[in-house]
Image (cartoon, grey):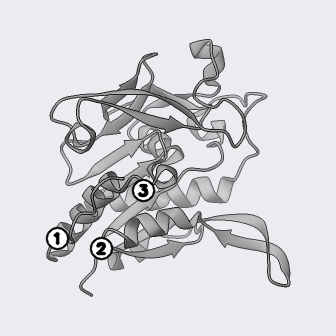
Amino acid sequence: MSRPVIGVAAYLEQARWNIWDARAAVIHESYVRGISANGGRAVVLPPDDVDAEVLDRLDGLLLPGGVDIDPAVCGQARHPETDRAQPLRDAGERLLLRGALQRDLPVLGVCRGLQLLALEYGGTLHQHLPEVLGHSGHCPAEGVFGEHALECVPGSVVCEVYGPRTRVNSHHHQGIDDPGGLRVTGRSDDGLAEAAEDPARRFVVGVQWHPEVSGDHALFARFVAACADRAGLVRPPAVPAL
């Protein structure tokens, strides 16, 4: 193919469409659009905790946002505000992430995806940020996005994409406590880690905000370009940020 093929982890939810009201493997279409609009070919990966061999046919992996990671994954007791557990999703995405890192595939983690990266690198999470930060600005209400400033570390991928300071959206109540082996490359004004990277790898970047919601092509363009390089393809043309 002339386009890099990028896997997007999907999840299982009850969904309604046409004549159906059934359990379905779903993913927000904006992730697919972010990849395809910037020269990639998205392949949706339903949860599977058996093996990660599908990665041998892919050029990159995107881990999307979604429900909370089960606190049992990092040995914590469940907080009353923690979402219902989705053990198959947790296990499947962790398996894909581990396999992608072993193959040196480019990885982009969004919100929950950043948190999975932190756990894979030996880090820990805050389960309920209002108790840690003293405010609910990172998730004002269910389905309502907040907005805040972001300070980026010079020389990082996020700084090259966004500059030293920008504003990003926000919808999460879990967050990174200890980033483990990742380098924190972006923080909000209240000190919370909002971006983290592994500079020793081709492209391993996690962000706590949602570029797919804001129509932000810049980060997707950088990710797809890294996937094209991994595949030995000509870099797809970058789409200017909106």
Q: Residue furthest front?
A: 242
The mark nearer the N terminus, 2 or 1, is 2
Q: Residue at x 42, y 18 (%)?
A: 189
Q: Which residue does the numbered mark 3 point to in the structure image?
A: 97
- Direction from residue 58 to residue 159 in the image, left or right: left
Q: Which mark is residue 184?
A: none
Q: Quadrant of residue 200?
A: top left
Front residue of 19/215: it is 215
Q: Quadrant of residue 10?
A: bottom right
Q: Which mark is residue 39?
A: 2
The mark nearer the N terminus, 3 or 2, is 2
Front residue of 120/117: it is 117
Q: Pinpoint residue 156: horizontal percent, then vertical percent.
A: 21, 37
Whether tag 3 and tag 2 are in contact, CB under 8 A, the answer is no
Task: Name the image quarter holding the N terminus.
Answer: bottom left
Task: Give the structural element (helix, strand or loop) at label 3.
Answer: helix
Q: Which mark is residue 235?
A: 1
Q: CA distance from mark 2 to mark 1?
A: 8 Å
Is 160 situated above or below 239? above
Q: CA distance from mark 3 to mark 2?
A: 22 Å
Q: CA distance from mark 1 to mark 3?
A: 24 Å
Whether tag 1 and tag 3 are in contact, CB under 8 A, the answer is no
Front residue of 186/52: it is 186
Task: Report the amino acid beneath label 3.
Answer: Leu
The mark nearer the N terminus, 1 or 3, is 3
Is 24 situated above or below 148? below
Q: Residue furthest top?
A: 134
Q: Pinpoint residue 217: horizontal percent, then vertical percent.
A: 35, 57
